[in-house]
Image (spheres, helix red, strand yellow):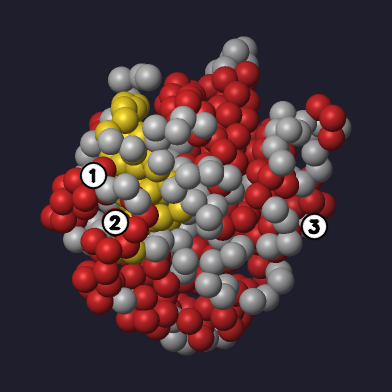
Amino acid sequence: MTDYVHSEIHGHTGVITLNRPAALNSLSLDMVRAITAALLNWRDNPAVSAVLVKSSSEKAYCAGGDIRFFYQKGIATPKDGTALIEDFFTEEYALNHLIHHYPKPYIALLDGVVMGGGMGIAQAGPKARLRIVTERTKMAMPEVGIGLFPDVGGSYFLSRATGETGTYLGLSGDIIGAADAIYADLADVFVPAAQLPALEAALLNASDARAAVQTFTAPFASQANPADSRLAGARDAIEQHFAQDSLGAIMSSLASDSGEFASKTLATMQKRSPLMMCVTLSQLRRGAAMEIGDCLRMERTMVRRCFEHGEVIEGVRALVIDKDHAPQWQPASLQEVTPAMTERFFESAWPDYAHPLRDLT
């Protein structure tokens, strides 16, 4: 394991602890490899009946991939870091696939910031997952704000979120809390952060970790009632505006609504990359009819195209490097985005037999 990922077995539970607090547990290639190695080692180990993934910090579960690394390698001359970027996304998406199909309960303690790549190591398949949120949870897929798209399986789990909630979250990059996450079907149960040590003790000592978690968290369900969530309150507006199949129609629909939700959402989206919002909408509509392996293969093609285009480099520069929050998007306006520009992101860079994720089933 690396200094940033610790793995050990407690009782019948394999425990992975993310330990890169200074970077909010942003994933590096070494971290992806360490998590993958642990999960593969435990997958067929009869002594391990469940897996728990948590953070050593109360500030973040995982804030995503290491975007500073992407920027530094993306601007390097010569392009000596290109292979490392390629390896990162190939191995990260393979890890997302492994988690989705994990044969044992996969329990994620989503305390603090859970964004981007953090969602990829949280959103296991429905047979395995148990996603726990707290009052400190800040969840988002904010990639359109840095000139990227909601990857790590976002094609799959956002397109299957409640109603058009996933479309809204993917296009706006909005940050949501515990009740919102449960409402959107991006989390399962709530527990107060103060109860996390007791919860962990209960599940580590249990023969059935999933049942232990569900029993422990049941008394706290009313504290994050999805029916009372902000997203539930905005459901009619979300369904009205985000059911459209073009970004222009969505923006026009929002502009025609004088309500506070529509006005704030429109103002937010006007700051995002027009091109990547168009790409994201197409991605989510396609992903709704695809299995997880096909979604991840599509995203692997898309991320290659993103770095070819350079939108993500500019987005990271404006948000993280220079922090001027004034990205020069290309194209600069929605009116300049053509269908051909969007379609380019879905044209595979490899023949099927050579795709780096060709073996995902």
Direction left: furthest residue: 194
Quarter of the C terminus within the rendering: top right
Closer to the camera, 182 or 100? Answer: 100
Query: Mark 1: which amino acid?
Result: Asn
Closer to the camera, 222 or 199? Answer: 199
Can you say whether 247 is above or below 128 in the image? Answer: below
Residue matched to label 2: 212
Disc nearest the viewer among 1 and 3: 1
Secondary structure, mark 3, is helix
- Residue 339 has which mark? 3
Query: Mark 3: which amino acid?
Result: Pro
Secondary structure, mark 1, is loop
Q: CA distance from mark 1 to mark 3?
A: 55 Å
Q: Residue at x 66, y 67 (%)?
A: 247
Query: Mark 2: which amino acid?
Result: Ala
Quarter of the N terminus within the rendering: top left
- Taking the image as shown, residue 158 lies to the left or right of residue 32, namely right
- Taking the image as shown, residue 353 lies to the left or right of residue 6, namely right
Q: Crowding at label 2, few (<14), some or many (≥20) Cα neighbours within 10 Å?
A: some
Secondary structure, mark 2, is helix
Residue matched to label 1: 205
Q: Are marks 1 and 2 in contact (CB under 8 Å)?
A: yes
Can you say whether 32 is above or below 266 in the image? Answer: above
Q: Position of residue 155 (x, y in %)?
A: 63, 54
Disc nearest the viewer among 2 and 3: 2
The answer to whether residue 322 of the structure is visible from this angle is no
Give the quadrant of residue 263: bottom left
Q: Position of residue 57 (x, y in %)?
A: 22, 39
Ranked by sequence position, the earlier of labels 1 and 2 is 1
Q: Crowding at label 3, few (<14), some or many (≥20) Cα neighbours within 10 Å?
A: few
